[in-house]
Amino acid sequence: MAEVPLSPGLTWLYGTQVYGIKLGLDGMRRLLAALDLPSPGMKFLHIAGTNGKGSTCAFLHAMLSAAGFRVGLFTSPHLIRFNERIRDHEREIRDDEIEAGLDRLRAVVADWQLAPTFFELTLALALDWFRARGCEWVVLETGLGGRLDATNALRPEACAITRIGMDHMAQLGDTLSAIAGEKAGILKPGVPVVTGPQKPEALAVLRATARERGSPLTEVAQPFDSLPLGLAGPHQRWNAAIAIATLHAAGFQLSPEQIATGLRAAVWPARFQRLEGGRLILDGAHNPDAAQALVAAWQDAYPGEQAVIVFGGSSGKDHSETLRPLLPLGARWIFTGFDSPRAVPAGEIRAAYLAAGGDPQRCQTTASLPEALDLARQHAERTLVAGSLFLAGELLALHARAAHQRSAQ
């Protein structure tokens, strides 16, 4: 597959990744001050967590859009196109707007001795575009952690912390309490915070931090079961409930019709996404909690069925613990590589599957996703593609290219 060449602006932006992840707020604060951001009157909803924060952001954005607000949405990572990270109530940021915005940023930071990071620049680009688009509200998804994440340089009207689990341990700590402490770093004095079901050690940290900082804490006790949702799976009903509670905490009074319309309209790719008429399911489950949520969603949608599971993983993850909950779903397994420097070789994923208790007679490896899909389609069961979001992005790109080719014929 031929790759689309990057524009000059994105080439420069991606080049800043050589500086790595720089946790801390000083650089972001300096960048905001230099750009006179955020604009006066712009208000924020700030969402952190290990799993579910993107879906919760999607619900929030969809409900506020349905209610007629001019609302921006900032998320990461993107699956196919950089533009996915920055959108408002009408559309994604366009390529020409990215280029113009990055030109301005490049001029501002040209003589800075300590260069801003990729994520800091991306957030600044988003806020600059939201200002130009007249956004009243912005839904912000944290990038990594919370306490030292660049998004934490902004003061929100309310924040939410979704399910906390074991992920990004190298940066956030190797215990649930330590990770929860980083996520709880987004709490600010007087700013209300919402959370849902948490493991006891994570909840204890959230409660203690909320008390210490004087942050009114709402603990959502029931999933939202009243109406259809645009996102599938029992876990999404918890995310929807957290989103609704966050709106209430921020002072919104949306009508039942606006809430219902937004919840139905919410879209979040690679979260139990049905493709090919439901014969192919895509889910970016890449840690143990996400895998458990995927199992619940599958059993809710297809009770009693098994799948041919195509799985690929990124470096830095505990793949055995992620695969273990999925074992009962797999009639057959195909482990694959994908086009990313972070892709773990399929043989290593197979070894993790065996370490988790998998059956060696039920699995095979392939070098590429197209080859894996060809093998999966030879079987009667539905295909479930899971694991790395890089793998999910590659699958969605394959589908987009195929659709484009069909339309051109």
Image (cartoon, rainbow, N blue to C red):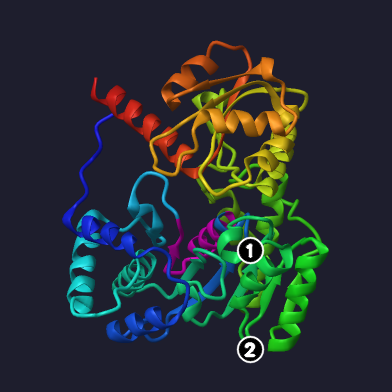
Q: Residues within 10 Å of mark 1 (few under 14, many from 20)?
A: many
N-terminal label among 1 and 2: 2
Question: Where 368 sits versus 210, above or below?
Answer: above
**Residue 72 among magenta residues:** yes
Tag 1 and tag 2, C-beta contact below 8 Å? no
Question: Where 195 sits versus 207, above or below?
Answer: above
**Residue 21 among magenta residues:** no
What range is drawn magenta here?
55-76
Residue 109 percent coordinates (x, y):
23, 77
Residue at image point 41% right, 51% down: 78
Q: CA distance from mark 1 to mark 2?
A: 21 Å
Q: Secondary structure at mark 1?
A: helix
Q: Nearer the viewer, residue 355 or 55?
A: 355
Residue at image point 39% right, 65% down: 119
Q: Amino acid at mark 1?
A: Ala
Q: Secondary structure at mark 2?
A: loop
Q: Which residue is mark 2?
A: 189
Q: Which residue is mark 1?
A: 243
Left or right side of 337 for 223:
right
- Quarter occupied by the N terminus: top left
Left or right side of 7 for 404:
right
Residue 409 percent coordinates (x, y):
24, 19
Q: Is residue 247 visible?
A: no
Residue at image point 55% right, 56% down: 54
Residue 312 percent coordinates (x, y):
53, 34
Q: Amino acid at mark 2?
A: Pro
Q: Nearer the viewer, residue 155 or 113?
A: 113
Q: Nearer the viewer, residue 160 or 138?
A: 160
